[in-house]
Image (cartoon, helix red, strand yellow):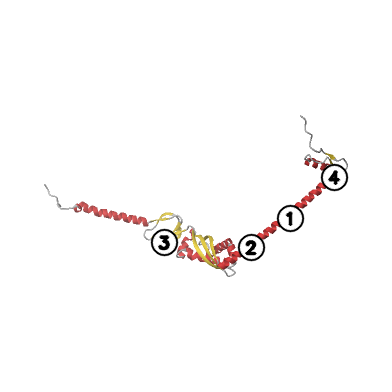
Amino acid sequence: MPRPPYPNAGPYDNPMNRMFVPRLVGLAVVVFIVIIIGSTATYVVEPGTRGIKVTLGKAADQFLPEGFGFKTPFITTIVPVNVRQKTVPLRADCFSSDLQQVVMELRVLYRVPEQSVVQIYKQYAGDPFDSLIAPRVQEAIKEVTALLTAEQIVKNREQIKESAIAGARQKIGEILWVEDIVIRNLELSPELEKAIEAKMVAEQQAAQARFTQAQKQVEAETAVIRARGEAEAIKVRGEALKLNPAFLRLEIVEKWNGKSPLVVPADRNTSGAGLLLPLGEPPASTP
């Protein structure tokens, strides 16, 4: 009986096994390299963002829209830029025209237009809000409040807001778009707050007094008009009685309740006898 060529050989000492293992390792390496190359050769731009293709440090002139695409592996990267609306808090220290300090707590709503993503990436570093929007919004707010007294600033928030939005948009231009500015709070000195509150209370009381006076005047004018109307009605009725005595008889008949006088004398200026009406209760009928 022939003896095996390798009586003490293990499973990896077999020539077939020695050839299979390197091939398996090589295949795994090739698959891994293919996966790496495939992942670096594709990109995905998420919703609400735009992509900027940067190849060897040079940014493309056109942005990439949302979706899937291919790029040169290892040497090209895709930088995402958010174009959705953002809300950022901002604080503005202002002075009124009467030299009162007013501190405003704002909320600025802004977004990056997609046509500006490449320009912002190339020309500005960091968050565009800090470098472009915040200083210009603060400047616009200060310009508006400098024209108003502290009391007017407290009363006219909407006017300040609209003027500040217009001024900020003019200063920023079209590279970024300020959607809205919300004035959340105004901080005044305690003395100024008390003075403004006292003045507003006095103005409300004066307005209430003016309203009461106007209401009384309207009531008096209404009473005069009513009296004139009644006098005119009496005059018209008297003229009608003079011209037509039958008008008086008609009114008496319409208003008679069964207890009127027996004889109503006729007008001495008119002809005809007086009007006779029954007096007392009507006789009861016999069964």
Q: How many numbered marks have been drawn onto this rendered protein structure?
A: 4
Q: Which residue is mark 3?
A: 54
Q: Residues within 10 Å of mark 1 (few under 14, many from 20)?
A: few
Q: Which residue is mark 2?
A: 203
Q: Earlier in the sequence, mark 3 or mark 4?
A: 3
Residue neighbourhood size for the residue with mark 4, other residues' Cα within 10 Å, grouped as few (<14), some (14–19), many (≥20): few
Cα gap from disc 4 to disc 2, whole angstroms? 60 Å
Q: Nearer the viewer, residue 180 or 270?
A: 270
Residue 216 in the image: above or below residue 93: above
Where is residue 278 shown, x and y percent of the image? 81, 37
Q: Is residue 42 left or right of residue 216?
A: left
- What's the amino acid at mark 3? Val
Q: Earlier in the sequence, mark 4 or mark 2?
A: 2
Q: Residue at x 64, y 63 (%)?
A: 203
Q: Earlier in the sequence, mark 1 or mark 2?
A: 2
Q: Which residue is mark 1?
A: 221
Does residue 113 appear left or right of residue 227 in this picture? left
Residue 237 appears in the figure: yes
Q: Nearer the viewer, residue 241 or 104?
A: 241
Which numbered tag is attached to residue 211?
A: none
Mark 4 lies on a secondary structure that is helix
Q: Residue furthest bottom?
A: 99
Single out the residue that lies furthest toward the top: 287
| Gap between marks 4 and 1 measured at Cα | 33 Å
Name the mark on residue 243.
Answer: 4
| For residue 25, above or below residue 247 | below
Front-lying residue, 218 or 4: 218
- Amino acid type assigned to the residue bearing label 1 in the image: Glu
